[in-house]
Amino acid sequence: MTGRLLRRGLATAAVALAALSLQSTGTTATAAPQPVVGGTRAAQGEFPWMIRLSMGCGGALYTQQIVLTAAHCVSGSGNNTSITATAGVVDLNSSAATKVRSTKVLQAPGYNGNGKDWALIKLAQPINLPTLKIADTTAYNSGTFTVAGWGAAREGGGQQRYLLKADVPFVSDAACSSAYSGSLIAAEEICAGNLAQGGVDTCQGDSGGPMFRRDNAGAWIQVGITSWGEGCARAGYPGVYTEVSTFAAAIRSAAAGL
């Protein structure tokens, strides 16, 4: 691997969701890569904290007025009114969508394109929807995770109209580092996907969206932020996510400062 292929501009459940893309666009079935595996449309209200950002990324409501996303989705810190957050719908064309402009952006201190891939976006007003709590320990950095977003349903594809979701299994740091020839920053990143077969993954446009699972009380908790990977849903190349627990204290402090 010669560099980090960031997932900005287009994420969720990659090749696995191409059939859903066809349903929403009316393309004939012959255009779909086969086989299509693992992934479905999210139900309205299923993940109420999901955010679509106008620069082509995803995010999650950290508070009702702050969105947690990826550092590579934004261009530095400071006042910023150019971003629109869309919330409250799974269908981006829905007239019921809530749209709120940004006021400030905080990119992770020290971000240089390698690791530390998190950022916060403050909104002009609160969005009255549930928030997604973040993991502050590594206790939930295992098992099966859920990913969601409006990004490409196949490698090289375009943004989706409907929110898509898929489940991806944890991949160990050792296996992921081997897959990426040592490019993984194990202390800051966590990997997930079907390592042997591929087929389910985040993709371009899912950047900044959450990877989450249930905690011991049955509530959703965010353990990752969609960051980068080699292509989408390729066998041997799992998705790489910012390890949220590593940065939980920094995220809390930064949010308080906004």
Image: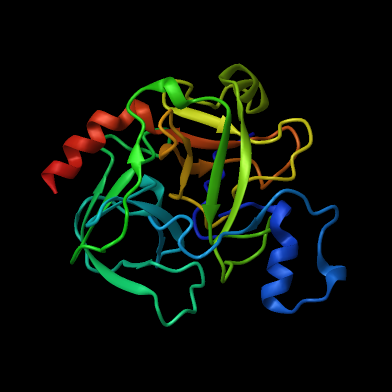
Measured as percent of width and height from the top left, residue 150 is found at 54, 62
Residue at the spot 81% in from the left edge and 64% down from the top edge: 32
Residue 246 to residue 14: above or below: above
Residue 140 to residue 105: above or below: above
Asked whether, in this view, residue 19 is left or right of residue 148, the answer is: right
Asked whether, in this view, residue 48 is left or right of residue 14, the answer is: left
Closer-to-camera residue (208/8): 208
Furthest toward the top, the residue is 174
Measured as percent of width and height from the top left, residue 118 is found at 35, 41
Residue 221 to residue 121: above or below: above
Closer-to-camera residue (21/146): 146
Quadrant (top left/top right/bottom left/bottom right) for the N terminus: top right
Asked whether, in this view, residue 240 is left or right of residue 215, the answer is: right
Colour scheme shown: rainbow
Q: Quadrant of residue 31?
A: bottom right
Furthest toward the left, the residue is 257
Total numbered circles: 0
Closer-to-camera residue (188/244): 244
Asked whether, in this view, residue 173 is left or right of residue 48, the answer is: right
Measured as percent of width and height from the top left, residue 136 is found at 32, 27
Measured as percent of width and height from the top left, residue 171 is found at 62, 26
Furthest toward the bottom, the residue is 95
Residue at the spot 64% in from the left edge and 45% down from the top edge: 201
